[in-house]
Amino acid sequence: MQSALNKDLLNSKISVVKMEMINLTIDGKAIQAEKGLSILKAARIAGIDIPTLCYYELNGQKLENRPGGCRVCVVEVEGRKNLAPACATEIMEGMVVHTHSLRVVNARRTVVELILSDHPSDCLSCSKSGHCELQSLAQKLGIREIPFKGAQSTYRKDNSPAIIRDVDKCIMCRRCETVCNQLQTVGALSAVNRGFEAVVATAFEQDLVKSSCTMCGQCVMACPVGALSEVNQTRQVIQAINNPDKTVIVQTAPAVRVALGEEFGYPAGTIVTGKMAAALRRIGFDYVFDTDFAADLTIMEEGTELLGRISKFMNGDKDVKLPILTSCCPGWVNFFETNFPDMLDVPSTAKSPQQMFGAVAKNYWAEKLGIKREDMVVVSIMPCVAKKYECQRDEFKENGNPDVDYSLTTRELAELIKQFNIDFNSLEDEDFDMPLGASTGAAVIFGATGGVIEAAVRTAYEVFTKKPLEKVDFTELRGLEGVREATVDFNGTPIHLGIAHGLGNARKLLEKVRKGEVQYHAIEVMACPGGCIGGAGQPYHHGDFSIVEKRFEAIYQEDKNKELRKSHENPYIKQLYDEYFGEPCGEKSHHLLHTHYFDKSKQVEIEA
Amino acid sequence: MAQIKSLADLKALKNSIHEKMDTRVKGNKDGLVQVKVAMATCGIAAGAKTIFNYIMEQADKKGLEIVLSQTGCMGYCHAEPTIEVTLPGKEPIVFGHVDKAKADEIMDKYIKNGELVEGIIPVNYNTIDK
Amino acid sequence: MAKYKMHVLVCGGTGCTASHSHEITDNLKAVLRDKGLEEDIQVILTGCFGFCEKGPIVKIMPDNTFYTEVKPEDAKEIVEEHIIKGRKVTRLLYTDPEKKEHVSDSKHMGFYKKQLRIALRNCGFIDPENIEEYIANDGYAAVAKCLTEYTPAQVIDEIKLSGLRGRGGGGFPTGMKWEIASKNHADQKYVVCNADEGDPGAFMDRSILEGDPHSVIEAMTINGYAIGATKGLIYIRAEYPLAIHRLQIAIKQAREYGLLGKNIFGTDFDFDIELRYGAGAFVCGEETALIHSMEGKRGEPTFKPPFPAQSGYLQKPTNVNNVETYANVPIIILKGANWFNKIGTEKSKGTKVFALAGQINNVGLIEVPMGITLREIIYEIGGGIKNGRQFKAVQTGGPSGGCLTEKHLDTPIDYDNLIAAGSMMGSGGMVVMDETSCMVAIAKFYLEFTCEESCGKCSPCRIGNKRMLEILERITKGQGCMEDLENLKNLATVIKDTALCGLGQTSPNPVLSTMNNFWDEYVEHVKDKKCRAGACKSLMQYVIDPNLCVGCTSCARNCPVNAIQGEKKTPHVINAEICIKCGTCIEKCKFNAISIK
């Protein structure tokens, strides 16, 4: 099988050969740009930034939302009778473009005024305030009043456990729709109704929770305004912290530490692990632990499960399910429960790190502290929106008490830090608390696509071959292409691995697996582009995927900085097995660290 | 029904249907000779129906494109069967006592060549459709 | 078999069908059977005659006797009098409104005299449910000619030479459209007939499909041959059940006769047609939206390029033409481009079908040569303004068009002149207005339609049109200010300049053209709070003339809201703040003392 990477390369070579340059003039500036580009892109190359609103691109992820609907990017093209949308108009030889003529400025301004006239002006209390692209556009255009008074379109609010839809704020940019359908192939959102009543909604205008939504939250990431946002639970966390009867524990996911800094002015890719731990302690968490500990634990369980399946397979067991699919990503779990209900026995039964941590905290650690699980509150800081839903799943509760009580996004943590008047930038680095704060480099790379499988390989190799691994960096597993594959030599036994990030890519890969077209031993899937570093709970990147790329580099840097880089070398993990679980995939871990999946294909209800 | 597989098939089919449509098609055309046969009770009694059918047949045979229609009593009961012929651009002329031979003569001479034949009744009435 | 001596043509268009034309047909047949005349006289249910004002129509051939407003019970008299005795049924004949005389021959009727029926050539003449009638009238001869005598390029050349332009509204040269589609190579191409007629009041496409479905099938086949497409799709709105029914019959018959399917006319050209039903969204008449709708997607436009000719239905090269455009094609092929291009004006060739409506005597469907003047249409074909009122304006092009006024009456009508006059051809709606029509209210009416039918994809159309409508609502209620007029004009200009698709870009036309031609009326509404046409209810005031009022109290007693006060035998007064303008007082006043101001 030719890898997707090679195909891309081949294509790019062809396009290099074919590349033809076009001469045009934008705002009096002579420009040469590649044929096929839009006026918008040609202008950007020339340093002219034409404002846009609906346009959204994830470069490198083959995603472009270009409905040409907002009409904010209109420009004047000489010889054309009406204004042209710069995003959707291809450059032509000799084209003369004006991006700020009186006609353009008036039209652009009127269009934005119109959009504002049908948009609630509750910026002061809007979750997107400060990150809202409509807000900054209005500011950029110097709009001080809206001359058009009239009706505002209204729609009922729709809250799912993870996502809030405030459709009144929808500006019909259709980014969420494109992301949900093209990038994620989830198909939960699309435009309904017409004219002034047109909105983006679910099929039959059901509640999101009854739709095929996986709560991956990429729509929240893409939404330029406050129409889609995550459920905010900072208030509940503050209350727990201030409740003297509760022991409040926090765990932080690997991807948070390479992105949180952006909220405090640090350049993308800055590692702020130490400041984050310090801030969490200032906020008042009783124990500042690390989800990375649980990631190491996941490798022990999932790696053992993988090796178990492989050895059964090699011993001729026909019933064994291969490939094994990772199950750390809650968006991905929702996706296969809805879309691949026939394959529920394929994914690993290992719980996600968040839930493993919760189980360890509320059982092992609560026992150690000698407190009841009801008196312990576990808070997780996640780069993710779907984790909010995951921690509420019934199978992760004991007598109604959840293993993880609240899951906050990276953005919510930044909000907490600001609320607690902490000067993040001047904090001295601090360490996590032990023992549940100890982790290896293998756990850190969980935050990037390919990381879970690389971490698993580092451990599985040594367990399988019983030889020490010389080179821990499996660069062949790293990268940001949507679907990747690699074969790792386990001392003579080739182990075929597949990786997909973005649910659309996952679907492609899974369909091939279902049809038997591809053979892998293990596949890692992450719902968000780039993995957790591109998660929907991270600071907004507004479509600038280079930010995600910088977080990606930072994750592997953090891995390199670690003394220990294989999960099974984590001394506290060893201790945990010795003291509590006995062995990986044993009786106790089966009870506390593994789960099962449900057929959700029928959950997509259609109410008459 | 047989499928049309060539231009010839189409033409053959068209010709076979032609009969059915002919009266309508001609009525729709401009500049054709109008022939009206008085078909009130008196006319029919005097043999107007036979003459109508005869003209219909013979006109086709002679290759004359005429619009043949029936009309009410023209008021010349003494001269039935009567027919009114209107050449394009000319005043209508009424012929009386039309039998098959007379009909042939009218068609061959007046309709074909504009030559007047005997048996013309002076027009002393107005038709409603001027 | 013997020739039929007479043909009785009964209109089977939607309008006449609603007035029981099927019963008329049944009754005629029954009476003829009783009289033993069924062999001699043929009764045919045809497509629309166009003169809907006077339907149901029954026409007797060959003498073109045109009976109007026929009722089922008139069948007996028609047979006994006209068919048997040769006496015309005078009471059913059309009466010329000017001369007050009966006109029997349709060729002499004012309504038909100036018409030139090319696209409608078979409507009201053949039985649309019988392929043989179409064939007898030169049907399928054009496609035969193309397949056996012309190369595809020659077909395109012929259409180009004819000067035929799209009849759906835009007026894009048809031959050029075909040429572009022919030059894009693909394993599969498509030919699509746009039968999503959506302009309010326009029904020419429906009439053609109901009256002459085979002409469209034949033209699509020719189109398929010309561009190298083997599949045709007709996108028709589901609200046109009769047109769908007749198309289904026509397609079935064409297949049975081998005129659709494999190896048409013994050549290696294959072509077949399927129907696709639209749910009746105006925007789906826009070709990219239409294609999305056919693909099962949300019916909303996407920007062009790519044009459908490059990437259309299922991303394959697709040629989309409107029904009326197609109806012209076979006859152009048969009679030659040089016959067609002699009709019409320099840049607009042939004829155009218009749906004549509004305050005009002869409401109906007409087909006229391009270049005819509005005056000819309104006063000669249309028989003038109803009730002898004064002509004020005519709206063409539906919600995308504008108003033409007195000063345009003698302008020859073609694509370019209409655009120059601030309107457009559109699909051919023509609504005539007299002095009782308020131009602000007319603009509001069309905008209501656009707002209802906007897909909501682009902000100028979704929000801008709504804001314009709100402004117009304020103005017609007497709540407008001069700033509103300014905003209205700016909005209209910006929407025209920035909307995504043709429908959005043209949606401000009714506002702009009424503002340009009737600015005074707008100002009157705003400043004087007055509607000179008396159409804007909120601006009307009921006033009692104290000189005429005798104080009989009848008005006050009947006023449902007690808005009228006054002592017995003294003049009464209407309290405008309470008055709901129901008109009861005017009805009750025996002294004509109450009027509307």
Image (cartoon, coloured by chain):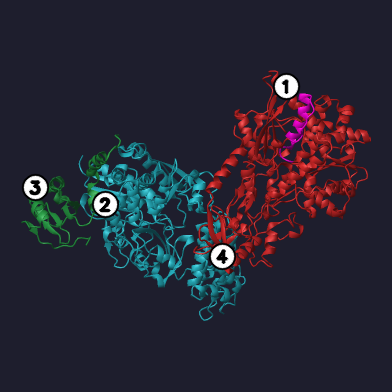
Chain colours: A red, B green, C cyan
Q: Which mark is residue C60?
A: 2
Q: Which amino acid lies under the numbered mark 2 shown in the image of this protein? A: Ile
Q: Are marks 3 and 1 on the same chain?
A: no
Q: What stretch is highlighted in magenta?
A: A448-473
Q: Are the two marked residues, 2 and 4, in contact with CB atoms closer than 8 angstroms?
A: no
Tally of numbered discs: 4
Q: Residue furthest top?
A: A316
Relative side of C285 to A414, left or right: left
Relative side of C9 to A283, left or right: left
Front position in the image: C385 or C373: C373
* Chain under callout 3: B
* Chain under callout 1: A
Q: How far apart are marks 2 and 4 (CA)?
A: 55 Å
Q: Which amino acid lies under the numbered mark 1 shown in the image of this protein? A: Ser
* Chain under callout 2: C
SS class, disc 3: helix
Q: How far apart are marks 3 and 2 (CA)?
A: 27 Å
Location of mark 4 (residue): C494
Q: Which mark is residue C456?
A: none
Q: Residue at x 80, y 54 (%)?
A: A264
Task: Look at the image and say whether residue C445 sits in the magenta stretch.
Answer: no
